[in-house]
């Protein structure tokens, strides 16, 4: 596994191996506290990030390694006109592995062609976010005990939400998974996901407009933000925005073992009153992100050494 650009770069066996390793890291942290000693992770973040960047940095530190990099394009030579290819080529002289986020889709793929060290895509535009997908898979497996035989509801911005797109692609390889897509018409799942994933595979799906009509059927509810900036006019946003706020009233109809996920950041789409409900998994999900990135960094560095 030289680079990780798309969640589909990983086979089901590789995903299971990473999740098993993450579980072992959670259970036996001392066993891993110096396995990456003298190794360096570069975090090249050309757009802002809180959880992804800090979880990568925390992951490398807890493996005993070091971190260098930048947190925005403004603090890099990109402001001078340096290309992504040149930046990556230079940074690969200084680091053993690179985590890169970029607003342009395909930028990490270009970086992988130029880098002498492994590249991890930490998010490229509205395209892919593979380590968030691994985080989601680890969370679902730890909460539900499985990755098959379930109904998953995805709610909010399904058109531009790269985390939803990546999750659907990853889950397409597990059996008997049914997706319910909950969104306004303006933010429905893109046609390419419907055609390339749902219709060409064995995974079933349906589209609905409100949480209330399906919440009692769900094993997992994956919330995302309905973004005001995606609407053509304010009136449509105002008309729809409260439909996609999850609160305790809506949860009255939900199963007792429902798992509520959210890639964060949250704005108002999950009421803070839900945070204390045991079904709220999103902060545990954020913590799982650190562990799965620890597993990924360790696996990729071992693969480079041929272990």
Image (cartoon, rainbow, N blue to C red):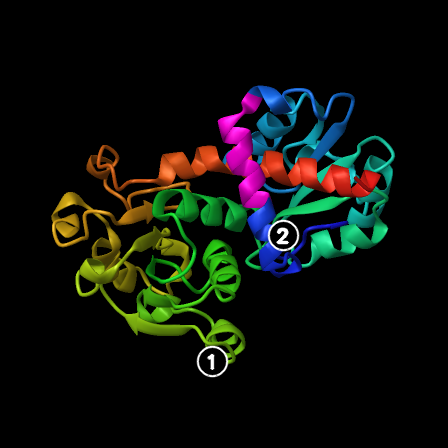
Residue at position x 44%, y 67% from top?
175
Q: Examine the rendered structure and indicate whether residue 186 appears above or below residue 124.
A: below
Q: Examine the rendered structure and indicate whether residue 115 appears above or below residue 233.
A: above
Residue at position x 69%, y 59% from top?
106
Q: Quick check: 27 left or right of 105?
A: left
At mark 2, the secondary structure is helix
In reply to whether residue 19 is colored magenta, the answer given is yes
At which x and y percent is residue 168? Answer: 47, 63
At mark 1, the secondary structure is loop
Q: Quick check: 137 left or right of 275?
A: right
Residue annotated with mark 1? 199
At which x and y percent is residue 220? Answer: 32, 54
Residue 44 appears anywhere in the view: no
In reply to whether residue 44 is colored magenta, the answer given is no
Main structural element of the magenta stretch: helix, strand or loop?
A: helix
Counting the numbered discs, the total is: 2
Q: CA distance from mark 1 to mark 2?
A: 25 Å
Residue at position x 57%, y 46% from top?
131
- Badge number at residue 258: none
In the picture, residue 231 is in which quadrant? bottom left
Segment tinted magenta in the rendering: 18-29
Residue annotated with mark 2? 14
In the picture, residue 292 is in which quadrant? top right
Q: Quick check: 296 left or right of 117?
A: left
Q: Examine the rendered structure and indicate whether residue 148 appears above or below residue 102.
A: below
Q: Nearer the viewer, mark 1 or mark 2?
A: 2
Residue 236 appears anywhere in the view: yes
At which x and y percent is residue 206? Answer: 32, 74
């Amino acid at each position: 596994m030289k680079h990780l650009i798309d969640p589909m770069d990983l086979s089901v066996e590789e995903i299971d191996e990473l999740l098993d390793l993450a579980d072992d890291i959670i259970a036996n942290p001392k066993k891993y506290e110096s396995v990456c000693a003298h190794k360096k992770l570069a975090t090249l973040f050309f757009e802002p990030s809180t959880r992804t960047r800090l979880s990568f940095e925390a992951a490398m530190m807890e493996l005993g390694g070091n971190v260098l990099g930048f947190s925005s394009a403004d603090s890099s030579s990109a402001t001078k006109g340096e290309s992504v290819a040149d930046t990556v080529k230079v940074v690969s002289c200084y680091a053993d592995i690179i985590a890169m986020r970029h607003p342009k889709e395909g930028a990490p793929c270009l970086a992988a062609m130029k880098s002498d060290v492994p590249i991890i895509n930490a998010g490229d535009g509205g395209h892919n976010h593979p380590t968030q997908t691994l985080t989601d898979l680890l969370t679902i497996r730890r909460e539900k005990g499985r990755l098959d035989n379930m109904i998953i509801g995805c709610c909010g911005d399904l058109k531009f939400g790269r985390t939803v797109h990546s999750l659907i692609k990853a889950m397409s390889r597990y059996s008997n998974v049914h997706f319910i897509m909950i969104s306004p018409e303006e933010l429905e799942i893109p046609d390419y996901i419907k055609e390339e994933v749902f219709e060409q595979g064995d995974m079933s799906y349906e589209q609905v407009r409100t949480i209330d009509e399906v919440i009692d059927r769900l094993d997992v509810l994956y919330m995302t933000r309905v973004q005001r900036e995606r609407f053509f006019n304010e009136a449509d946003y105002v008309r729809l925005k409260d439909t996609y706020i999850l609160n305790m009233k809506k949860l009255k109809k939900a199963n007792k073992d429902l798992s509520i996920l959210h890639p964060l950041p949250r704005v108002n789409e999950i009421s803070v009153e839900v945070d204390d409900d045991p079904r709220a998994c999103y902060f545990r999900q954020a913590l799982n992100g650190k562990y799965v990135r620890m597993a990924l960094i360790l696996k990729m560095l071992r693969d480079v050494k041929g272990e």
